[in-house]
Image (cartoon, coloured by chain):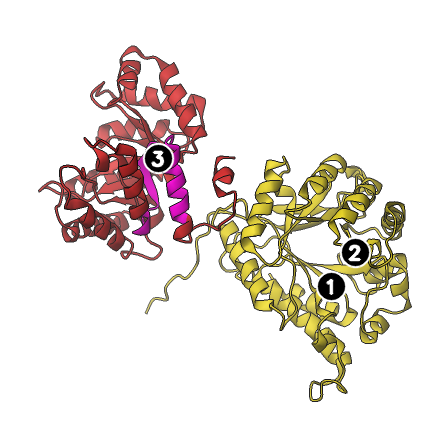
Amino acid sequence: MQIPDVKEKWVSRINEVTIGATSEQGGTRSKTITVGGQSTLPFLSFEGESPHKTVIAGYVADTLPNWPDVLKDAIGKEINSPVEWAQKAVEEFGVDLISLRLIGADPAVKDKSPEECSKVVQDVLKAVDVPLIIWGCGDDEKDNHILPECSQAAKGENCLIGSAKETNYMTIVALCKADKHKIISEAPVDINIGKQVNILLQDAGFDLKDVVMFQTTAALGYGFDYVYTILERARIAGLKGDNLMAMPQICDVGGEVWRVKEAVADEDILPGWGKLSKRGPLWEATCAGVYMHAGADILVMAHPEAISIVRKIIEKTE
Amino acid sequence: MILIGERINAGFKDIKEAIVNKDGDVIREWARKQADGKASYIDVNLGTASNKAEDLCWMIEQVQKEVDVPISIDNNKPSMLKEAIPVCKKPPLVNSTTAVEEKLDEILPIIAEHGASIIGLVMDEAGSPKSADKRVENAGKIVAKAMEYDITPDRLYLDPIVMPLKYMQDQAKEILSAANQFQLFSDPPCHVVCGLSNISNGAKHKRLINRTFAVMMIANGMDAVICDVLDEELVNAILTAELVMNKEIYADAYLEAFRK
């Protein structure tokens, strides 16, 4: 019996987005990172091409996050300095790029000034030579103050800047156009708003080929399946020719997983769940690995063991 | 939705005169307007203005001077198609063949040779069918022949033949039912197309009838349509129907995004 051909015929490709700039390109990075470009769904190498492997961005914050000891200890004392943390992530954890979160700017955290934030950006850029993702603190009003300074401090480095939402996209578009950075478009686990934000970016004159989509991220057990299906549906739409959904996608796995009780509470609180030192990194690695299946191109990760597990999965992909 | 712009047709007085007088400006202007209206193909029809292949080629060239939208060659004569298809810069859509076997054996090899696409009208020697069943039967003949010539489903458009609502009111239901069944021939299915304005032929409320029928056809699998792409309300209804059918992902600005 002849085996039927099950190959799907996609009509389109996912956009390729390059982050970082070398000295020839006007930056100071030793290499650039390119994501996207797929002509098929993840892991279906028999059907089409996935020219760029999923990349891991090391989670770094300007201020110590509210994380469990098991994670802080695994990263080490360097976690107290964004510069040292970034260096360790690149040199020891082997991440492809750095994802810098300026959480200290949040008025409810340390309310750091735009100058303090841009100084961190500059210091991290000096300390490591991989491409950089820069996120604000998540407070729209404050981000509108700090991101222009940070963007300017990183001018020419072709960073990926996050994030543009329905409420604040104009500022992000203006600064990314002026300083030639790429944009993360964000929607709150909502594919329709995701598409809408992309339309708004396009209307504002930003080239959608310079956009990476972010549907926020959920940890396993906390709406994981919702985010999974959105990533997958967006990817399918992109492959089917919807150029408003043909962007690479980013997941903030590290930033999300280490907030849920399964990755935070040890056996004394969750009897029968196994040691947290093992369970925590596994929770993060599992989430990241499954998001790869859904269509994630950039995984922001924190725990060195989780990074190592996911790195092995990535290396096996074709 | 694959929108096929119907306006460059010698049935319209300005086009007929343009062909007779070789006035390329008129052709190019309609090509531009329809391309701006997001036509996926621009239909080119000589009608009774001429029966010369060189005139058909001239029309195609005029369109291609102005826009890079692919051409739908509205002609069924193999001799004309052999000359017109090579003029097209992008693989054209040929409009059309019937389900008559000799006709299929004449036209499909030309389509296959040039990597073109083809609209198959589900009429046979006996003319236009009256029932859904006969339409599906004729469609089956076209699908089988297309397979014989290695024309894949994505290059085959089945047209159930739309009849005027005003004069043949019982037909619309049959057409909708046939369109629905066209999707079952293959997986992935071939395209389903129709010449939309036939439905409102002779009627008073043409545009309302056109868009109502378009929406109902989309609910029954239509994914391509020969129509007035400059009828904004029609195109809006089509875009909305595609959302209702979950063919596209909803966004609040879906109408604006289409026209961007």
| Colour given to chain A in the rendered image | yellow
Q: State whether residue B152 appears in this view.
A: no
To the question of a shared chain for discs 3 and 1, the answer is: no
For marks 3 and 1, give the CA distance.
48 Å
**Residue B83 to residue B182: above or below:** above
Q: Element at badge 3?
A: strand
User: Which residues are the magenta region?
Assistant: B218-242
**Residue B50 to residue A27: above or below:** above
Pointer 2: what residue? Answer: A101
* Nearest to viewer (mark 3 / mark 2): 2
Q: Residue at x 44, y 57 (%)?
A: A8
Question: Dot 3 surroundings within 10 Å: few (below 14), some, or many (20 or more)?
Answer: many
Question: Dot 2 surroundings within 10 Å: few (below 14), some, or many (20 or more)?
Answer: many
Q: Residue at x 27, y 40 (%)?
A: B194
Residue B4 has which mark?
3
Amino acid type shown at disc 3:
Ile
Pointer 1: what residue? Answer: A255
Q: State whether residue B219 appears in this view.
A: yes
For marks 3 and 2, give the CA distance.
49 Å
Quadrant into which the N terminus of chain A falls? bottom left
Question: Label 2 is found on which chain of the structure?
Answer: A
Residue A140 position within the rendered picture, expressed as x and y whole percent measured from the top left:
73, 49
Q: State which quadrant residue B36 falls in.
A: top left
Amino acid type shown at disc 2:
Arg
Q: Do the residues labelled 3 and 2 touch (CB within 8 Å)?
A: no
Q: Element at badge 1?
A: helix
